[in-house]
Image (cartoon, rainbow, N blue to C red):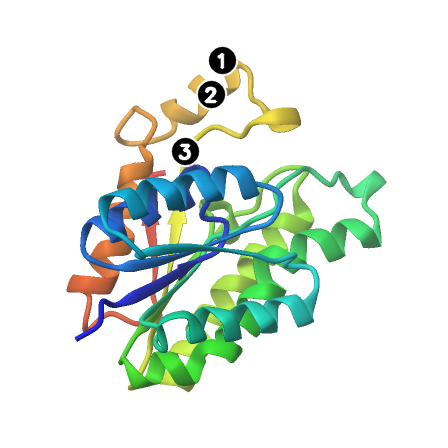
Amino acid sequence: MSAPVALITGAAVRLGAKTARQLHGQGYNIIIHCNHSLGAGNSLADSLNAQRPDSAIVLQAELSDTQAVIDLGKKAVSEWSRLDVLVNNASAFYPTPLDNVTEDDWDTLFASNAKAPLFLSQGVADALKQQQGCIINISDLYAGRGLRKHPIYTMAKAALEGMTRTLARDLAPHVRVNAIAPGAILWPSGDNTLSEEAQQAIINKSFMKRIGAPEDIANTVCFLIEKGSYVTGQVLHVDGGR
């Protein structure tokens, strides 16, 4: 039998890359989606293929382009003529204070966090049904509680969780659909970097009194795929008790 196949969006760096390595280590062939991080995606694919030849490929796509998303799904299914897992991980994130919010912000943040996951799920649903596969959406702790100065991002992640629950109904019993809502796992980078004081304030609000690790999310993805055969329509918080 051919190896199971997982498509992970935004898989070149951070949580996506860790999840790709984890699933690859469990015998999956990996489709690494990326857009701007093509160099990192190619490096990751080279590393995985060095461990197991012809076990990883890179597909580049702009998730704000619906046709590109549809094409991504078709290419992913055609590569190994099967698809077992879709992880909707790619996510744009930046503040949009109400006084400055624009329609472009809406389009950008909803594209990767809600729109692309929907149309990608639509495009690969039949392939997933054939394998009794699953969809895992990476949401956010703040989808259910709101994040100051991030109204559009919060709305988009809330939409993703609504999609999770609805597709779990629509695709049952052949495809399970769940979401993971991380807490403080990796601190934001670039313009969204937090001060040490802000980081410590977040840590202090968790029961565990520490930041999580990318492995915590990757392990949860693997649990939902391999061990969670009776789990669907759920949003699992991995946030240290936030």
Residue with the mark numbered 3: 184
CB under 8 Å between callouts 3 and 2? Answer: yes
Compared to residue 146, the image places residue 130 above or below, namely below
Q: Residue 9: percent from the left, percent from the top?
A: 48, 55
- 239 with respect to 192 (left or right): left
The extreme top residue here reads 196
Nearest the camera: 76 or 229? 76
Q: CA distance from mark 1 to mark 3?
A: 13 Å
Q: Residue 55: percent from the left, percent from the top?
A: 30, 56
Three-letter amino acid code of the residue under disc 1: Glu
Q: Residues within 10 Å of mark 2 (few under 14, many from 20)?
A: some
Q: CA distance from mark 2 to mark 1?
A: 5 Å
Q: Residue 100: percent from the left, percent from the top?
A: 84, 40
Compared to residue 51, the image places residue 135 above or below, namely below
Q: CA distance from mark 3 to mark 2?
A: 9 Å
Q: Quadrant of residue 68?
A: bottom right
- 20 with respect to 200 (left or right): left
Image point (31%, 45%), residue name: 48
Q: Quadrant of residue 231?
A: bottom left
Image point (84%, 49%), residue name: 102
Task: Answer with mark 1 or mark 3, whichever residue precedes in sequence.
Answer: 3
Residue with the mark numbered 1: 196
Nearest the camera: 52 or 106? 52
